[in-house]
Image (tube, rainbow, N blue to C red):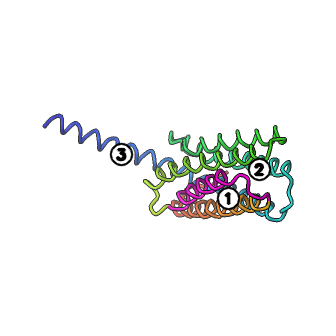
């Protein structure tokens, strides 16, 4: 019986620690909602540019993707570290940020990559970030009810990467439109989450950012 009592106490303590840590993380992310808004805006701009430039060359596609991935990665890093002051770092988003920075740097430093290599790199980046975003969303849902936008964004990233891997030899125009469509859809979902966190920050009465 004593052992059972200790076991129940430990389970309650772990659950409380998770809730407290999640609450601190949520507060930090809500204070820095603009980081997610920046991610969404960059994704939408990237998608619109790709749509507006259907005859884009492989070189410019690599450079454009590289700039987008680096900007997205930096914003994801800021989001991930937004709760560090209270000891609640969002490590899943930190990994998403590092992955984006790495793929963006590769695309810019080696713009002469073949079309197949570039598309495979984008696909792997999308699948990996999708997995991390779903894990991050599961953690976020523990403290933010009915949160679906980040889960949907992660699932969309995985689906996009899988389609790109399955048909890497599709026509250039089809590939550009696929990438553009994904970027715009992902950007809209990120903006939705950012605006929800902004409302949460406003209603919580937290002090404004300097």
Q: Name which quarter of the figure residue 171 lies in.
A: bottom right
**Distance Cα–Cα, label 3 vs label 2:** 42 Å
Picture coordinates of residue 107, whole percent (x, y): 78, 42
- Residue nearest the viewer, comparing 194 with 68: 68
Task: Please indicate whether residue 180 sits to the left or right of residue 148 in the image.
Answer: right
Q: Which residue ends up furthest to the left in the rendered image?
A: 1
Would you call the spot at circle 1 few (<14 residues within 10 Å), some (14-19), or many (20 or more)? many
Q: Magenta-highlighted stretch: main secondary structure?
A: helix
**In the image, which disc is placed on residue 65?**
2
Callout 3: SS: helix
Residue that label 1 marks:
40
Q: Give whichever of discs 3 and 2 has the lower sequence position.
A: 3
Residue at disc 2, secondary structure? helix
- Quadrant of the image containing the N terminus: top left
Per the model, the C-alpha gap separating discs 1 and 3 is 33 Å
The percent position of residue 130, horizontal first and vertical second, equals 58, 51
Whether 152 is among the magenta residues is yes
Mark closer to the observer (1, 2): 2
CA–CA distance between discs 1 and 2? 15 Å
Query: Looking at the picture, how far across and down is residue 19, in whole percent?
Result: 40, 48
- The residue shown at (15%, 35%) is 2
User: What residue is rendered at 43% in x and 53% in y?
Assistant: 142
| N-terminal-most mark, 1 or 2 | 1
Q: Secondary structure at mark 1?
A: helix
Q: Which mark is residue 161?
A: none
Q: Which residues are magenta?
A: 148-172
Depth check, mark 1 against mark 3: the one in front is 1
Mark 1 or mark 3: whose residue is earlier in sequence: 3
**Which residue in the protein does label 3 denote?**
16
Residue at x 62%, y 59% (from the top left corner): 190
């Amino acid at each position: 019986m004593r052992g059972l009592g200790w076991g129940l106490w430990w389970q309650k303590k772990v659950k409380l620690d998770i809730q407290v840590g999640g609450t601190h993380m949520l507060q930090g992310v809500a204070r820095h909602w603009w980081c997610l808004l920046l991610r969404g805006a960059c994704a939408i701009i990237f998608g619109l540019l790709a749509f507006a430039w259907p005859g884009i060359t492989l070189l410019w596609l690599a450079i454009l993707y590289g700039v987008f991935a680096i900007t997205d990665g930096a914003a994801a890093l800021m989001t991930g570290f937004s709760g560090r002051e209270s000891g609640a770092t969002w490590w899943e988003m930190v990994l998403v940020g590092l992955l984006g920075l790495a793929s963006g740097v590769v695309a810019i430093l080696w713009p002469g990559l073949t079309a197949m290599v570039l598309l495979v790199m984008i696909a792997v980046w999308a699948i990996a970030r999708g997995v991390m975003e779903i894990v991050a969303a599961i953690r976020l849902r523990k403290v933010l009810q009915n949160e679906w936008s980040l889960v949907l964004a992660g699932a969309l990233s995985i689906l996009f990467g899988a389609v790109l891997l399955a048909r890497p030899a599709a026509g250039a125009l089809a590939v550009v439109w696929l990438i553009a469509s994904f970027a715009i859809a992902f950007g809209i979902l990120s903006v939705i989450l950012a605006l929800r966190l902004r409302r949460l920050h406003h209603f919580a009465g937290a002090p404004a950012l300097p």
